[in-house]
Amino acid sequence: MADNPAAFPDAAPEVPDASSVERAFLRRPSIGIRARLALGFLSFIVFAVAVTVGAWIMLSRLERRLRFLEVADRYTMEIQQARRFEKNYFLYGGNLQDVQEHIANARRLLVAVAPDAAEVVASAELGKMRDHLGRYETLIARLVARDGAHASADRAERPAIEAELRDHGSQMVAFALELAEKERASVNATLALFKRLPVAFLAFLLMFSVVVANFLARQIVGPLSRLMATTQRIAGGDFTPLMPLRWYRDEFSTFSVALNTMMRELARRQEVLVQSHKLSAIGTLTSGVAHELNNPINNITLTAEMLKEDYGSLADEERLDMVNDLVVQGARAQKIVRNLLDFAREGEITTERLDLVEVLRQAASLAANQIKLSGAKIAIDVPSNLPAIHGDRQSLSQVFVNLLLNALDAVGKGGHVSIAAGTSREPGYVQVVVSDDGRGIPAHVLPKVFDPFFTTKSRGKGTGLGLSVSLGIVRQHGGDIRVESAPGRGSTFTVLLPAAMVPGLTENDAQATRPSASKPSRPV
Amino acid sequence: MQERLQVLVLDDEPIVGKRLQPALAKVGCDVEVFDAPGPALQRVAAKRFDIVVTDIRMEDIDGIEVLEDVLERWPTTKVIMITGYATVEVAREAMAKGAFDFIAKPFKPQELRDVIARAAEALGFAGIERAAADDPA
Ligand SMILES: Nc1ncnc2c1ncn2[C@@H]1O[C@H](COP(=O)(O)OP(=O)(O)OP(=O)(O)O)[C@@H](O)[C@H]1O
Ligand SMILES: [Mg+2]
């Protein structure tokens, strides 16, 4: 998840400095997790409100239709009633009072229903209905007026009125029935829709929940697992700051900034430890260097004294030989001191392409004095065609000095210490094996030797920081240190370092092959 | 005329022998120099030296072993140890094992001559060497 560039990347010289990363985080707009959760739930609430309002509107419309349907039924009934009385009137000659009453009822219903009816039937239809009703009413009124006059003046008029009444009446009934029928069908359709609606709503809700839940989970689980990977990386000694990956900033960004601060502190502390342990190593090395330095100084003293004593009596070539000796021994002394000074110099950590052979030579020549002084023997086997590596010369030579000094402490007079370098079985790695035939490390101690401050040496002799600091340095270079040891059989420390990358091999490829074991391996 | 003092000088720095040879010859010593313990010990087995000067720290065989070897064969030979820095304990050990004296690097030829003169006196040689050394060159 989190990309994990080594602390010493091959091609990219600009390791982002912490404050610029922090600024990059802070520049981003803030969208907190709380806000996103609130947004998620708000969308649910909005959805629920929309559904509720929709349902309410539909239900009230349905209610209006049911009412209309009821009115339409009553209207039909009134018309039918009116027609029944009308029929009676023509058959048996009753009065038309009842017809008028029912028609008046029907008209009232029609007026009352008019606003509701507008959305159910076309207004032309409604107008037609009103026309029929009006015509029917006037015809009835004419009949009533004729009967009131008692003058059967125009007998022929009656059948004409009757025919027209029939016509309008039947059309009125047909209209009313059709209207009611239509309305019933529409109401039924709406009801059927209502029956399906909850199912659709449920399905949609399910989908919506899945999407929202997924979104929120991604928002939270993603950064969480990135942070988790980061803590693992930190445990492995990689203190590269986290870079912002998103266009906004949230609680995780704050956390990342805090992690970066922590990593910066850790790196600083590690540096202080490295530096202070280096001072103690220099203390140890000094005795060997001083001893070694005594030889050229002694040679110079003897030569200079004899030159002075016999100056007049010496042949020219003898004098020249002596002066040459002085020059050579002076250079030798300088070299011995420069080695120590090089090692002691407190320099910036710089990443450069390094010839491991040179680093090993420097470390070996520093520790070799010490080893010789103690009566042990050192063997160095470094092939000259070793692949180059990338790293900091100073810290790496500190690693090898530490391993050599440890070996020296473990062997006695007549013991053997060896440095052998070569390509590792891990592809892409160079290894340096520092081994001794000293007392070895008991199995119960072995897992602890890389712990800071773990030492079996007496106070003032060992700080217990040598291996811990060395492992820190090597991990920062993307490598690892493995140990094999058994009591009485000596110890072997193997330092793995990534070989300088062949062009074409990307950073990630190299990361993928990072040696897996992070714990010291057990003796085999 | 007195017999000359037989001296063997052993130091794995070749320049030490090269310079001490004339320095000691001047004060009346017959000097043989070696820069490796092996040949030196062979020579000791073949010839008795009055004085053996040996470095205490060498590869292969160290000065203490040379001391023991010489004293075993020639108990009256005076052995002078050359020590480096931080080997005071070893020097003490050498004294306990019968070394005549020790001299610390770096030293001047005259300092060694003085020690040799004392050793010669202890051996019964008159103080010629010292006198000779005091002669301005
Ligand atoms: N080559 C070795 N042989 C045997 N034991 C070893 C070897 N290297 C390390 N150890 C054990 O591991 C312990 C821790 O080593 P480390 O270098 O971290 O500290 P130290 O050597 O005790 O102290 P310092 O390095 O400050 O002198 C040592 O005390 C020793 O017991
Ligand atoms: Mg150590």
Image: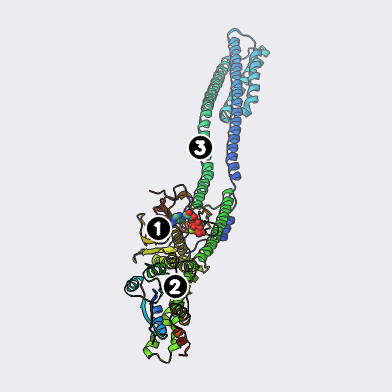
Report the disc number at residue A210: 3
Element class at badge 3:
helix
Left or right: residue A181 compared with residue B38? right
On-image quarter of the C terminus of chain B: bottom left
Q: Is mark 2 within 8 Å of ligand 1?
A: no
Mark 2 vs mark 3, CA separation in Å: 90 Å
* Mark 3 nearby-residue class (10 Å; few <14, some 14–19, many ≥20): few
Of labels 2 and 3, the one closer to you: 2
Disc 1, ligand 1: is the CB inside 8 Å? yes
Give the chain letter at badge 2.
B
Number of marks present in the image shown: 3
Residue A340, placed above or below residue A229: below
Quadrant containing the N terminus of chain B in the rendered view: bottom left
Label 1 environment density (alpha carbons within 10 Å; few <14, some 14–19, many ≥20): many
Q: CA distance from mark 1 to mark 3?
A: 63 Å
State the residue in front, A497 or A461. Answer: A461
- Give the image location of residue A388, x and y in percent: 38, 64
Where does the image place residue A361, in percent across and percent down from the top left?
41, 67
Earlier-in-chain disc, 1 versus 3? 3
Amino acid type, mark 2: Met
Compared with B39, A129 (above or below) is above
| Residue that carries the numbered disc 1 in the rendered image | A436
Marks 1 and 2 belong to one chain: no
Let me know if residue A297 appears in the view: yes
> Is mark 2 in CB contact (under 8 Å) with mark 3?
no
Mark 3 CB lies closer than 8 A to ligand 1: no
Name the residue beneath numbered marker 2.
B81
Which residue is nearer to you in this view: A14 or A414? Answer: A414
Chain letter belonging to callout 3 = A
Chain where mark 1 sits = A
Closer to the eye: label 1 or 2 = 2
